[in-house]
Image (cartoon, grey):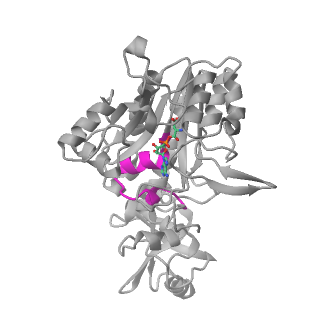
Amino acid sequence: MKSPIRNRKYATEITADNEGEHVRIAGWVHEKRHLGGVFFLVVRDLGGFAQVTLHKGEVEKELFERVKKVPRESVVAIEGKVKSEKKAPNGYEIIPERMEVQSEASQVLPLDTTGKVGAELDTRLDARFMDLRTERTKHIFIIRSRVLKAIRDFLDERGFIETNTPKIVSAATEGGTALFPISYFEREAFLNQSPQLYKQMLMASGFDKVYEIAPIFRAEEHDTTKHLNEATSVDIEVAFVSDKEVMALLEELIAFVYTKVMDYPGLAKLNLKLDVPKTPFRRINYDEAIKLLSEAGEEIEWGEDLSTSAEHTLGDIISELYFITDWPCAIKPFYAQPGDVEAEGKRKDICNAFDLMHPKVELASGSQRVHSYELLKRNIESKGLSADGFEFYLDSFRYGMPPHAGWGLGVERLLMSMLGIDNIREVVLFPRDRRRLAP
Ligand code: AMO
């Protein structure tokens, strides 16, 4: 990694081999220590830490006093000579000649950035700009960026077209979760829960394989460790395939993302070692899930959705990534394709829909889609919705719509499950939840 600023070096760009060279570093005052006649200042930058050492009597008095006084977390630029020092981070220290205080920090910091004094998540989120200065939090977001890049690389490589669909919409897609209404001039509109309708409409365009990585808005009333009101979803849609093909693509993608993250050196800061999940993932159908749950003492009837407790019970039994397939149509959205009685001998009230589960949390859901205009219209109405509100969507099924399938994968759910993090808010820069609208 190279500093983007001319003449400035990152702490990790310097080594003991640069002994005697004149360098300029810039960053935050991480720690200050006074031992006898020697003063140590640790400067932190994106790369790591540099130790600046001042021997009383050997540096100018004025500089010595200014360094001693500069408050922790101030932004400083320091010029000086490199000296090899085995006990310092990266094996060198800097003997300063000049220090410029570019921004002095107020005393009494909202958080300790050294990791020595822990803080509640709420306190950390209130001062997120500062929490991001801690090693652990910094690495979470660098990993998040790697995950997103890996997803894009994987899909681009396979000929997917990245798209952007509207987030201000007129219709709901996911029954069960509420919408956030907004005022749109003289009409009512909503924040989109999912790009579902739009990605399906793109299947009528001939684009064949599309994806989008974008926010989804869910007006979930409850305040849990796995729900956000604004989350990020990776959505794909593929024409001329069934649920089977997109499930295979999903498991390959997850394994690929793991391989791209596992060699990241910052993982050690999270005390993590990642094992790439073996593909294909285990598949159980909904009936088997209900049977396993009943045997484990969960009270659940056929046709009910899985509660969080049921998900955890199944996770304890299966303890790896797995798919639940063949869901009752009644608990899946109107766009999920019912089973094919003739070809597959499936019941008509079972849909070609699936969820991808981590033992602790659902990661993704998807399905083969209904592509018959008549069936889709009937399904919308049978869910108690008015087909009028879906006209713009239904129209795209009337003039040549190929069979298609797709899924939506929660970026935060993937990250928290990979990194063994219990609270989803940890993996969002500025989370939006039932109580939090700032920062
Ligand atoms: P679903 O509603 O299951 O499916 O959402 C897909 C995935 O998005 C993530 N997710 C959330 N993450 C955090 N907080 C939330 N409130 C939240 N809601 C959803 C989850 C979930 O598995 N249109 C379908 C997808 C499809 O069929 O293509 C859909 O939105 O990881």
Whether residue 423 appears in magenta in the rendering, the answer is yes
Residue furthest top as drawn: 343
The quadrant the C terminus occupies is: bottom right
Q: Position of residue 3 (x, y in %)?
A: 58, 55
**Residue at (55% x, 63% y) in the render:** 22
Whether residue 195 appears in magenta in the rendering, the answer is no
- Left or right of residue 115: residue 319: left
Residue 305 vertical position relative to residue 392 in the rendered view, above or below? below
Q: Position of residue 308 (x, y in %)?
A: 34, 51
Residue 158 visible in the current orientation: no
Q: Position of residue 403 (x, y in %)?
A: 56, 19
Q: Which residues are magenta?
A: 409-430
Residue 287 vertical position relative to residue 60 in the rendered view, above or below? above
Nearest the eye: 108 or 13: 108
Residue furthest right as drawn: 186
**Residue at (54% x, 48% y) in the render:** 232
